[in-house]
Image (cartoon, rainbow, N blue to C red):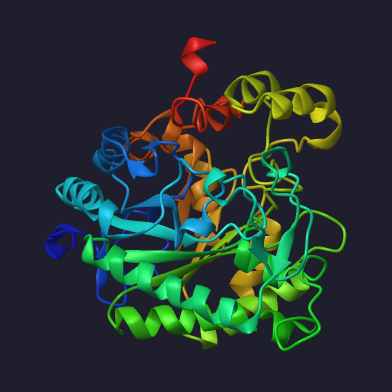
Amino acid sequence: MPRINISEFRTDEGSQDPFSPIKLRKLLLKNRFIKSATYEGMYRGGMPAGQLIDFHTRIALGGVGMTTVAYGAVNNAGRTHDEQMYLHEGVLEPLQQLTDSVHQYQCAASIQLTHCGYFSKNKQLAGKKTLAPSRRMNMYGFMEGMFFSKSMDAGEIIGTAEDFARAAVLAKSAGFDAVEIHMGHGYLISQFLSPIINSRTDDYGGTLQNRLRFPLMVLERIRNAVGGDFPVLCKMNLDDGFRGGLKIDESIQIAAALENAGADALILSGGYTSRTPFYLMRGDIPLTQMIRAESQMLQKIALAVFGRIIIRKYPFAENFFLPLAGKIREAVKMPVVYLGGVVSSEGINRIMNEGFDMIALGRALIHDPDFIKKIRGNRSFISPCNHCNLCVAEMDHSGVRCLIDEK
């Protein structure tokens, strides 16, 4: 846990000052800023590379209260591709190096726990069916011969929830101060929550109460495994971004259910990786660079031919999720983290004045890890990030980084 001298910081409860500290259970964050979980692409054969440690150390040096390691799959089948990490004993040493390095800057470390569901091209699963709430065509893995998912049986559902809990314990042993359960973006838990993707007719499908059964099981298993002092955050969708998907009316009910089940904070997001990938990453679509980063030749051809047709562009606007996120803020009393289009001092003040407890940052910090220091000293500061999204293409090429200065 980062050693923070509380006397150095203001401690106003319910403060609208984003630089005031906040507590999540017994974890004290020095300010209200979190580096959001954006996939880094800094793994080699599923092992964290030194580049990953350097990346999060630099983010910590820039002044965030907590940085989040993205996409920690809870088992091998939970990876979208075989370069990603899943949590097992073999990755604990480099992860401990990461948390130790981050802690020296009084920054907490969290890790995102997730499972891809049917959305996978993991070559280690080639010839096998991916797991999902319902049978679905897996376009992402189609070129690898992974055509369809199978509908998970009750044993697989319970076993996967136990894998989430086991992964959380491993993360805690590696020095992480919190975990984030990924319930959004079209991965497995999100697939259970989405009314059009989850077509089950048993206790895990149909009504929202049934579709919540697996997500709440995961939260309960993790809470029981890590104990009462360890923060467990949940990232959830405000809107899936396509017809028939999850919408805000049900998202409000999901937020209330997570609050009642003991989640420590909600991180509000949106979009569905397999259907609306740029619903969250609003701005340009770097199709040329995405084609270059794709390793599978047939996938390259498909992107070149159909990319402009099937990948929808969403125009960027500052704080673009604020109207939807405000509905969740009004519905729950627990800490709520705003995410989406944060680029300026003025915009941050607007978010805090709307009653949000914390702010998650992605592209602004990828462009400049010192973004927080700059807004603290300049009330009119605006990030130079131009939302070109070249950093998105770099995730699967050489690791996420800003390319604005190289254009």
Residue 225, located in which quarter of the rendered image? bottom left
List x then y, in percent, for residue 281. 63, 40
Residue at the limit of the structure toward the top, as seen here:
407
Q: Residue at x 50, y 77 (%)?
A: 159
Location of residue 330 with respect to 389 vertically, above or below: below
* Rendered position, 65 above or below 74: above
Residue at 76% across, 48% down = 275
Question: Nearest the camera: 137 or 338?
Answer: 137
In the image, residue 404 above or below residue 158? above
Nearer to us in this view, 206 or 230: 206
* Residue 251 place in picture, x, y as percent: 69, 72
- Give the x, y percent position of residue 276: 75, 46
Quadrant of the image for the N terminus? bottom left
Q: Could you tell me which residue is drawn at 43 percent across and 82 percent down? A: 221
Image check: 1 left or right of 295?
A: left
The image quadrant where one finds the C terminus is: top right
Residue 74 left/right relative to 301: left
The location of residue 15, given as percent across then percent down, is 38, 66
Q: Quadrant of residue 183?
A: bottom right
Work out whether residue 31 can be spotted: no
